[in-house]
Image (cartoon, rainbow, N blue to C red):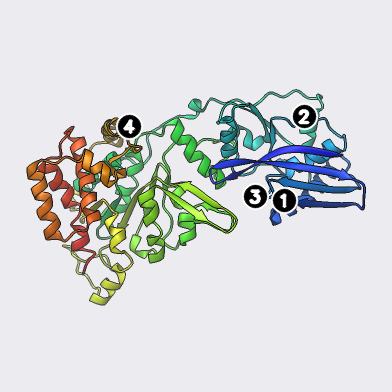
Amino acid sequence: MLAKILSATAIGIDATIVEAEIDVGPGMPSFNIVGLPDTAVQEARERVRSALKNTGFIFPARRVTVNLAPASLRKTGSDFDLAIALGILTATDQTRFNSDRTIVVGELSLSGEIRPVHGILPIAHALSKEASSYRLFVANANAREGAIAGKVEVYGFRDINQLADFLNGNQAKNPVTIDPQSLFHHTNRDDDLSEVKGQRHGKRALEISAAGGHHLLFVGPPGSGKTMLSRRLPGLLPLLSLEEAIEVTKIHSVAGLISGDRPLVISRPFRSPHHTISDVALIGGGQWPRPGEISLSHHGVLFLDEVLEFKRNVLEALREPLEEGKITISRASMTTTYPAKFTLVASCNPCPCGFLGDTKKTCTCSTSQIIRYRSRLSGPFLDRMDLQVEIPRLDFSDLSSNATGENSEVVRKRVEQVRLIQRERYQKEGIHLNGEMKVRHMKKFCVCSREAHDLLEKSIESLALSARAYHRILKVARTIADLDRSEKIDIEHVAEAIQYRTLDRKYLEF
């Protein structure tokens, strides 16, 4: 007999339906899977055989052939175990199942337990966009995650026996329902801006970065507070909307970072990879492309501490996603695109010992050591850092002061107001933030006063800045003007923006 079971698999943060055709016919006992399966799918034969036998079902002593369609799509992972097992039970009349509009996804243990798989939310979200309604059968641990998508009846099962009892009418079961809004329990982050002593200039740069979505570089001696400042940026960003939270959760789901008790990412991601990370781990990839750190930072912050310790090829791999807000990973069998709209924050010492230009300690590095140290940061990469800020050593008076500055919530409210201004301004342009502007947008929205234009022209010539740096200055000046509630960019806005472009000449060109 022939049975057809619908399954699905995640491709990037999207999904596609896979039809499992199971034929149980006469012939020598065998079990074959066709349809471009990888090793994990081929191993499903032993998992399915043992799972059925160990749960009291009969594995047919006949010729079993499984075809996973479409054959042009490479099948990976263990997502299809449950669909194959259910197809065998249906084809041998051991259970009753009407497969119409029902998607079955899950891995099987040898004991018949249904185990969770990665990428359930992308699958459920794709099904929710279809005109017809679907049912989705998954493991109990995946059910809450799938229910977030809405418009899809998601059923969670413990094992094959429980699923068979439900299909045969021996056990009633209701679909899992969840209100995504109920998962939003926003609380203030532990890292609050008020805990940072001094560093008024660095705090101002953080606010500008958060308000306009600008990338940020901190340069200063060890212990000056670069890392402490950087970790405060997520707390200054607006709270995630439900749409943003679902998009972030889809990426984390594909990466296997979602648990059953926390099915939705409700806070902005903050990723801080070690400097030994590879370019593949950073941008994503592998034989079957998986999201990297830049995609896991989507709608959040990617922090590269001691950025000059990273390999140069790793830093150069960031150039495209910094401009495009996404990364496309191409392999012989498929091309996958992951979103990567993040705010990059990097920190570094000015030299290997860390004390070049310090007022208290003398630098012990040779000229060749400094040149070799800085060579890892290319000009094109540096040009993409909108804000370059020197973080000086703190004086004792700052460290011992009991004065507290603004907390993160106060600054975040200002940031939210400025982002509303930008959202309204760019509602017909396909962008949301000043940091996302292209040249055509700057011509339209970055109107400078005569004094501001003259200052900008003189500064570009005297500092020998590139065209990209010029555009970055305009973007930052636009954000500073928005913080001042000014539609026109005035001279003080340009002057402040220019001061954030001087460190690449002072420190990073020796």
Q: Residue 35 carries which label?
A: 1
Q: Name the residue under label 4.
A: 427
Secondary structure at numbered mark 1: loop
Q: Which residue is pictured at 27% across the width and 54% down the height?
A: 218
Identify the residue position indicated by label 2 in the image: 98
Q: Which residue is drawn at 77% across and 42% down?
A: 21
Question: x%, y% of residue 479?
Answer: 23, 40
Q: Sequence-wise, which precedes: disc 2 or disc 4?
A: 2
Q: How far apart are marks 1 and 2 (CA)?
A: 23 Å
Q: In this view, does 389 lie above or below 20?
A: below
Which secondary structure, mark 4? loop
Say if 486 sits above or below 386 in the image: above
Q: Which of marks 1 and 3 is nearer the N terminus?
A: 1
Q: Residue 428: x, y in percent?
A: 33, 33
Q: How far apart are marks 4 and 3 (CA)?
A: 37 Å
Q: Which of 138 and 266 is in front in this view?
A: 138
Residue 197 visible (yes or no): no
Q: Which amino acid does label 2 sit on?
A: Asn
Amino acid type of the residue that numbered disc 3 sits on in the rendered structure: Leu
C-alpha separation, residue under disc 1 versus residue under disc 3: 8 Å
Residue highlighted by disc 3: 73
Q: Are marks 3 and 2 in contact (CB under 8 Å)?
A: no
- Quadrant in which the C terminus is drawn: bottom left
Q: Residues within 10 Å of mark 2 (few under 14, many from 20)?
A: few
Residue 28: x and y in percent read 92, 53
For the point 47% across and 40% down, the residue is 248
Amino acid marked by disc 4: Gln
